[in-house]
Image (cartoon, rainbow, N blue to C red):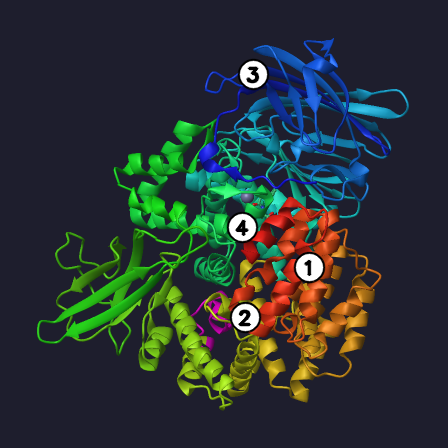
Amino acid sequence: MTSYQTTYLKDYQPANFLVETVNLTFDLAEDKTIVTAVIDFHKNAQNQSTERQLRLNGEKLILRTIKLNNKELPASEYSVTDKELTLLQPPENFTLTLVTEIEPQNNTELTGLYKSNAMFCTQCEAQGFRRITYFLDRPDVMARYTTKIIADKTHYPILLSNGNLVDAGDLADNKHFVVWEDPFRKPSYLFALVAGDLECLTDQFITQSGRDVALKIYVETGNRDKAYHALYALKQAMRWDEINFGREYDLDIYMIVAASDFNMGAMENKGLNIFNTKYILADPNMATDDDYQAIIGVIGHEYFHNWTGNRVTCRDWFQLSLKEGLTIFRDHEFTGDMTSLVANRIKNVRQLRAYQFAEDAGPMAHPVQPDSYIEINNFYTTTIYEKGSEVIQMMKTLLGKEGFRLGMDLYFERHDGQAATIEDFVKAMEDANHFDLTQFRLWYKQAGTPRLHITRHYSPANKEYTLTIKQICPQTPGQKDKKPFHIPIAMSLVDRTTGQELTLKVKNTDTKKTTKQILELKETTQTFIFSDIPQEPVPILLENFSAPVHLDIKLSEEELSILMMHANDLFSRWEAAQTFFLQIINQMIENYQHNQNFSLTPKFIAALKANLTNTDLDPAFITEMITLPSERYICGMQTKIDIDAIHHSRRFILKTIAQALSGEFLQIYQNNSDHTAYKIDQTSIKKRQLKNLCLQYLMLVEQPGYTELCLNQYQQSNNMSDRISALHGIINSPYPQKKDCLADFYLNWKHEPLVVDKWFSLQAMSNRPDAFDEVLKLTKHEAFTIKNPNRVRSLIGAFSSNNLFHFHRADGAGYEFLANYIIQLNSLNPQIASRLLEPLTNWRQFDAARQDLMKQQLKRIGAVSGISDNVYEVITKCLQ
Ligand code: BES
Ligand code: ZN
């Protein structure tokens, strides 16, 4: 029987022993791998408890030998369970030698040491190292690692681990060995090992202080030419961190390995990152523009962890956002600088509203610093990541660019080489700026998305404008009453006819007179008065999304149109479009529910058109402006979900816009079509993305001429972006021969797994009436396997979390389908199983019939015997 144990932040205790050095030897072979660990332990003076025993974590290990100070340990002095090895009476200082046996070839969970195709690789975060040897597998136990790897020379010519290569040589029986030494102390979760027959793309980087760093990207044979973009992104990231944060790389070698079987996106192991192939491999034929952009972000992310995560690591897993939220913040800034600031900010806000707002409103809501967990792998959430990043962003808004940098510098200065806490970070920000963040800390402790209610009043008599802002944070699991947050509200007031910003000053404060103000909301209700305002202005609040909150403000269609067309700040134009759109769709949803007709105000179309045809605007911004909210985004912004109403209303809006602006779409399609050689510079990417969005609109018009255009693009394109975009247009249209296109595409690309994933996703997300039947058929396709996480995500994941209309079919077949896969994956790969549960978690937001059907499946999964901690935790929290 499994016991489900909850870990609490309040119970944190330093480990009772610490580790100086870890000496590992891996003897890799096909039937079993032998791991010899020689570990130097000493008593930790920081630990207050009287516990004599040393309890080491260990899972799925066979213990072959145990020696203490080189002497075989008698059975009476230790005990072993399937989770722990306990030394009953260890001395204060000693060397432990452990020989354990593991079977990486049978490891389907893909944590610890496992095989991906012919390659051995590891994934140790959060608690995978304990599946390699017995250890104090917690991030505050930091040690120096030396790793010897022995393997067959023919099958595993490349043998890698963290740090620097210090020895290598040949052995008997066609074997060879290498020894790697990592000079930096690190927690076990940053350990990595790779062995395989890999190709390598090599370069070098000279750091700002003039040190030479060897860069090496390892990929499976045949893929070397697909690693250039990742290499480019890496060099950009290294330079960017020097310029923007003064952070230099610290080892002489930086290695990245691409693995086909990988639970997550990528992992920041010290000096040896391991990536999902999806975020390394790219060439014009197989990768889309989005893929190229995503690679920049992920390469940046894992590189930036070298300082925010590795040099300064986390004391315990409750501090996860200390490294993840902060590193997301850094990779967002990097991606913004590399692509388009405003378009990138818009993408991130979209993501937050579609995913994090939904999480915060449901049974899985938790603070950025949670106070308990059952399975830590369930806490790599959008709240820890994206909301955590927004909390950092708010500090930057409050402290200013320079103040924020001072805080970062102080944080690194104080905590380099340590396992730190979120409190340490906030304290550094506070101390560097003499700024009180006491109330601000609530952002880490209280879950839920606050709502701001705005009332506005203009007095023509004394030319005063008054904003009254009220904050309310809804209840979340375990948190009934919330204290008011400290919320930075970036704002401006604009002239209601020209849209130009007014110069302002908040009455009774000593802030400067400027066009942009940062209001600091600290009370439940607060009033801000602006004087010398000649006529009633239009307010722009939460500029650049200055806080992760909902904003309730009633603006008229005229006001929203002015903002959409004339706001100086482009983000605010986009935001006005979102507000306008949501007002429109909410009205349509009501009409749908009362069997009334739809109609779309020409004001909205006119405001879109003004942006679409404005050639002064960056095409990346235009693309964002005319990309309407997805079904998920709409759901994230609502408390009750009527998926049929949302789907039909949204389709109506899209089609109406497509018809009204088809001339413009065609023109822009043509203007941005480039018949010269394919290029992937930012200008070309932005034009191509705009062009392809126009094509999607044209396909909604359902005219033979446009279908022709789309088919031509499909047949003649010289790159994957154009090809997949055309295929997308075709399969979502009534075009009768689309099956041929799909077959043709598969035939051409079946040798390229990442492209086959796209082929599955495209069909999984189709809005055609037979989408679900097609998904069912695809599960029987020769290329489908549940052993590969990318493939599972591309079909099962894409369908259930991105095809909401079909997934939530009224008969519940979508739910049953998903539950079947979760049950299968529960025993193979519990991390993937538990992540797949997400679309069922917000069952309370649906109508009674769907609630019952969803609950039924949750209960069915919960009743399966041998349910993993991962799935158990999500199920129980959902059903509570
Ligand atoms: N440290 C994580 C990878 C990780 C997550 C390992 C969960 C084990 C469990 C890594 O830095 C990360 O955050 N990766 C993201 C991609 C990133 C660009 C947001 C991922 O894998 O999704
Ligand atoms: Zn990360």
Of the numbered discs in the image, which one, if any, rests on residue 860? 1
Where is ligand 2, by quadrant? Answer: top right
Residue in view at x 61 percent, y 13 percent: 90
Q: Could you tell whether 512 is left or right of 15 in the image?
A: left
Q: CA distance from mark 3 to mark 2?
A: 53 Å
Beta carbon at label 1 within 8 Å of ligand 1: no
Is residue 703 visible from the viewing direction of this image?
Answer: yes
Q: Earlier in the sequence, mark 3 or mark 1?
A: 3
Q: What's the magenta region?
A: 612-629
- The three-letter amino acid code for the residue at tag 4 is Thr
Residue in view at x 73 percent, y 12 percent: 74
Could you say which quadrant of the image residue 426 lies in? Answer: top left
Does dot 3 land on a helix, a strand or a loop? Answer: loop
Which residue position holds label 2? 846
Of the numbered discs in the image, which one, if any, rests on residue 381? 4
Q: Earlier in the sequence, mark 2 or mark 1?
A: 2
